[in-house]
Image (cartoon, rainbow, N blue to C red):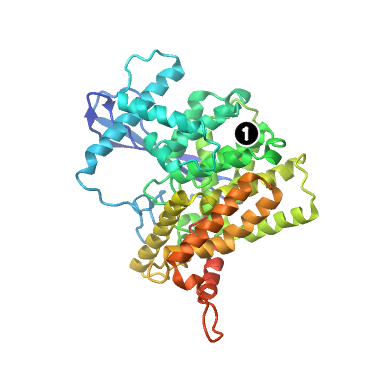
Amino acid sequence: MQVLTQMTSETYKFDLSIGILPLKRRGAISYDSSDQTALYIRMLAVTNKTIKSSFVFTPDVRVRSQVGFEPERRGSHPYLGVDFRTLHSRAESAGSIPARRIRRLFSFQRHLLSSRLLRGAPHLNPLHILDEDYCGQAKCMLEKVGSWNFDIFLFDRLTNGNSLVFLTFHLLSQYGLIELFQLDMVKVRRFLVLVQEDYHNQNPYHNAVHAADVTQAMHCYLREPKLAQSLTSFDILLGLLAAATHDLDHPGVNQPFLIKTNHYLAALYRNTSVLENHHWRSAVGLLRETELFSHLPAEDSLSIERQLGSLILATDISRQNEYLSRFRTHLDENDLNLGNASHRHFVLQMALKCADICNPCRPWELSKQWSEKVTEEFFHQGDIEKKLKLEISPLCDSEANTIASVQIGFMTYVVEPLFAEWARFSDTRLSQTMLGHLGLNKASWSTMEPEASGSSEDGESDPARSSEEPSSRALTQGSPES
């Protein structure tokens, strides 16, 4: 394979109190879906050494296949000029700049502290007392990380936007996976930081906070009696890594958008599970870049990558009925044997699917926030499609849909069937709690959508049913919810 390296320079401002401000890093990897040959790798990184110059050189590395195919750079739209990294960005007021600088300062100070602790260095420069207070509150929250009422939004604020890093690292430590698999803690932290950075936090919904929320939900499911008694440490490691990376580098638009705009990812993966394949390959790229499993035999590392892909690909909502039907058949025939590795893996796939769309099963205060965020992302895509004179995707037209109508249809046709079967498999207090919240949340949205609860007169069809059925079809054909 041919490697081309190009050097560019950018100017960065210095703050004498902390040195150079944290620098953005972008990374992505895409493979050919048939032979898994790396066709495109783009890594934008900066040196972590002390910089005395006002210029930082950034390598732009492209790897071409022997056939000479080189897709467009990540984040750019090859035909319509849509930059996914700024798709959902908003103009910030001048007053918000100092607050952002303060948050970055706190975050960087915390990074320096944790780096010193990992190296065993003494804590010479204590953090600001306010920052220590936030760390203390976040630590207290982690003591209840197994609670279904865990407020990921609050935890993200307490960790200055680092919820995914702190929560996942804590869970890996709590399960004893770092010691058991002899993982280098510095590599683990670096991997998690890069994962968090490769989520687009401009996205209202598909961002690092969503990934942290899914990871926390996955932890709750892993603690369920049937799973806790059967899963191996290897299964748990895969489940947590898949949850943390399941939407990695999500562009904030759905698969149909990528297909109808001829985006290179759609061509690369032949219009099949486009986003999920990209999430998986991006995760593989970061695993290899950080060499997290380089100490393991090669066949073990490849097995981790393959099974990680199998879990992430299961979150493709266009295959929802396929997985649900298989799950229902196993439960009807009562033939799930968790002593069988393939059966355990299938249950992990179902657990990840539940974790991915569990927002309607959270308490109303949390569920409502997620509903508003995902609908905002839907509608923003619809606005982009209007601007580009494209056909508006289902559920993405703000003039034809409301938050309530979208959520009622999603709960009825996607969430309820899945969690009803999960409750059959794991009939526990948690399952009943989730179904209880689901019913209450659906009722709450119904009160905001009067036509959804009213019955028509003179034998006319129920408008709720006529409006929900198209939503159900749309949600199983590549909705942004996936």
User: Is residue 240 depicted above or below 106 in this figure?
Assistant: below
Q: Can residue 106 be seen in this view?
A: yes
Asked if residue 371 lies left or right of residue 459, the reply is left
Q: How many marks overall?
A: 1
Nearer to me, 58 or 312: 312
User: Is residue 111 depicted above or below 438 in this figure?
Assistant: above
User: Is residue 186 depicted above or below 361 in this figure?
Assistant: above
**Residue hosting label 1:** 301
Q: Residue visible at 61% across and 51% down?
A: 314
Expressed as whole percent of the image width and height from the top left, the position of residue 295 reads: 60, 25
**Identity of the amino acid at label 1?**
Ser
Expressed as whole percent of the image width and height from the top left, the position of residue 258 reads: 46, 60
Asked if residue 247 lies left or right of residue 61, the reply is right
* Element under disc 1: helix
User: Is residue 261 depicted above or below 132 in this figure?
Assistant: below
Expressed as whole percent of the image width and height from the top left, the position of residue 103 reads: 30, 35
Q: Residue visible at 80% across and 49% down?
A: 335
Expressed as whole percent of the image width and height from the top left, the position of residue 29 reads: 49, 43
Q: Residue furthest bottom?
A: 458
Q: Can residue 5 be seen in this view?
A: no
Q: Residue furthest left?
A: 94
Nearer to me, 188 or 454: 454
Q: Residue visible at 67% across and 55% down?
A: 421
> What crowding class fits label 1: few (fewer than 14 Cα within 10 Å), some (14-19), or many (20 or more)?
some
Residue 201 quadrant: top left
Residue 98 quadrant: top left
